[in-house]
Image: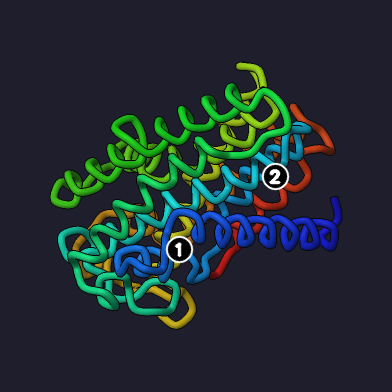
Amino acid sequence: MTQTEFEQRYAAYLETAEAALARNAQIYLPDTSEVCRAARYSLLGGGKRIRAILVLAVCEMLGGDDTAAADFSAAVEMLHCYSLIHDDLPCMDNDDTRRGRPSCHKQFGEATALLAGDVLLTQAFEAAANAQAAQNAAEIRARAVAALSRGAGSRGMVYGQELDLKYEALSPDEAQLRTIHHYKTGALINAAVQMGAACAAANAETCALLEQYAFDLGLVFQIVDDVLDVTSSSAELGKPVGSDAENGKVTYATLYGAEGAMQLAETINCAACARMQQEFGEASGFLVLLAQRLLTRKK
């Protein structure tokens, strides 16, 4: 796949994801509710939509049902957005900006923001459960909902957040950092990948191969985040920078320095892309180039 083809495919996936988000927001987040207005403010306020794009890209690579994938892409972004709203709260990371705008709790107040996150979490599962599918709809929905649940809950993102809070005062080593981010970041990325695979009724072997890619992608994403926190600016990122250092938090950037951390990310990324090319050939072109883009991103 050429870079031009990648950009065209990326733009098409992004358009599909945004349309699905707008459609699902209209269904599940009525404008008559202040809580839902807060949820819409955060959900429709931009973002990279990486998880939504992964659902769509994996589905297409495997020849799956793209109608179901569109609704699944909205569901995973709704759930991701809930986590961002809660992460920004004073009891968590206490961040005042998100995506270049005031955080949900700064715009609507803490109580409303908390409930906005709750409603996005809840409605994500309804959106997935009601996804349209051309055939085998019940099986596709069940697999997708199960993947989203695993990625989000006590064996996924929430557990990762628990570990992240626990180790703030304990100075984790690299192995412990990997465990934290395996769950905190990688688990929901894997959920997105597996939801895409569900659209194609992928077998266990294919799902396992995609899982390895997803967790590697999540780790690289987190390492780059850590580096950007010390090398970028709030204007570039659309969110506060330097908070990790201010809070004495151990990250890949503090363990290895920015350059060493990026070398580690490059090594992981290279191996992940090589495996995808070996297992899926030319069909993996978009996912390989997406991994490379996330490695070199500046925000």
Where is residue 133? Give x, y as percent: 67, 34
As measured in the structure, the alpha-carbon distance from the residue carrying label 2 to the one carrying label 1 is 21 Å
Furthest residue in direction front, as rendered: 32
Residue 187 numbered tag: none
Say what secondary structure mark 2 lies in.
Answer: helix
Q: 247 or 79: which is nearer to us?
A: 79
Q: Residue at x 59, y 22 (%)?
A: 139
Which residue lies under the disc numbered 2?
57
- The three-letter code of the residue at mark 1 reads Leu
Which residue lies under the disc numbered 1?
43
Task: Give the image quarter of residue 89.
Answer: bottom left
Query: Does label 2 or label 1 sit earlier along the sequence?
Result: 1
- The three-letter code of the residue at mark 2 reads Ala
Furthest residue in direction top, as rendered: 204
114 sits to left or right of 61? left
Q: Residue at x 53, y 31 (%)?
A: 144
Q: How is the rendered protein coloured?
A: rainbow
